[in-house]
Amino acid sequence: MSARRLLLLGPPGAGKGTQAQGLVDSLGIPQVSTGDMLRAAVAAGSEVGQQAKAFMDAGKLVTDEIVIGVAEERLRQDDAKDGFILDGFPRTVAQAEALDGLLEKLGVALERCVAMTVDEDELVGRLLKRAEIEGRADDNEASIRVRMKEYREKTEPLVDYYRQRGVLAEVSGEGTIEAVAQRIQNALA
Ligand code: AMP
């Protein structure tokens, strides 16, 4: 039996989104990507989008308050009842604590945090390549540098946070998509 309440943790460019998509197909549970939801909010011009846009363009984290609201609303939806793959949330200790509180209210718990590790030069190369293909507004060199710094300072402490809770699995994100997917599957078994 695979764990079904999952978090993919890792720096920008680690392949969280790609691997989350594979898990959606194999496990039949939704991907919850705050980055995707925020980009949709920006595109729709909603209030959340207007508040988030400047942070995102600069590569900075959007405020905890905004992101926690977005994630909570999504996790309360029916299709997340039997499991979910969190991708890009939580990114700060405050967000992780808010997630714990929400899951406790919902009577469930996070079963596995898969921390994906990739060498930093490889990450920057991947992000610059994605910039050419997808044209994401924040995939430029200045923003990439800020996002890496934000990750190291604010998000990396979550590796220890989840290790202490006994749900951490560390997985190399290098190699082919299939090889990484196999490692993740093993970590969820
Ligand atoms: P992503 O697609 O996950 O790389 O997210 C793109 C951008 O959205 C990030 O650089 C942040 O500006 C913002 N963002 C997404 N998720 C979060 C989060 N959990 N906390 C703060 N900002 C976030």
Image: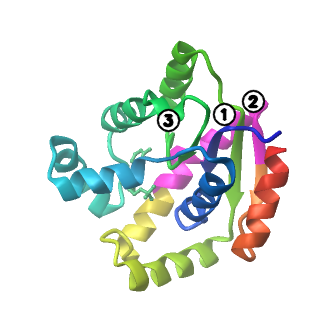
Where disc 2 sits, the SS reads helix
**In-front residue for pair 70/4:** 4
**Of helix, strand and loop, which one carries label 3?**
helix
The kind of residue on which mark 2 rests is Gln
Instruction: Report x, y in % for residue 5.
Output: 65, 35
Q: For the magenta stretch, what is the residue range?
A: 150-169
Q: Which residue is drawn at 65% across and 30% down?
A: 110
Q: Is mark 3 within 8 Å of ligand 1?
A: no
At label 1, which amino acid type do we have?
Tyr
Is 153 placed left or right of 189 in the picture?
A: left
Q: Is residue 37 above or below residue 117?
A: above
Q: Does the magenta stretch include residue 187?
A: no
Mark 1 vs 3, N-terminal side: 3
105 versus 4 height, above or below: above
Query: Given the image, on which type of amino acid does mark 3 rest?
Result: Asp
Mark 2 highlights which residue?
Answer: 164
Q: Which residue is drawn at 82% across and 49% down?
A: 187
* Disc assigned to residue 161: 1
User: Closer to the camera, 151 or 77?
Assistant: 77
Where does label 3 land, which residue?
Answer: 79
Marks 1 and 2: CB-CB under 8 Å? Answer: yes
Dot 1: few (<14), some (14–19), or many (≥20) neighbours within 10 Å?
some
Residue 59 falls left or right of residue 105: left
Quarter of the image where the N terminus is located:
top right
- Answer few, some or many: residues within 10 Å of disc 2's Cα (few below 14, many 20 plus, some between 14 and 19): few
Q: Is residue 160 magenta?
A: yes
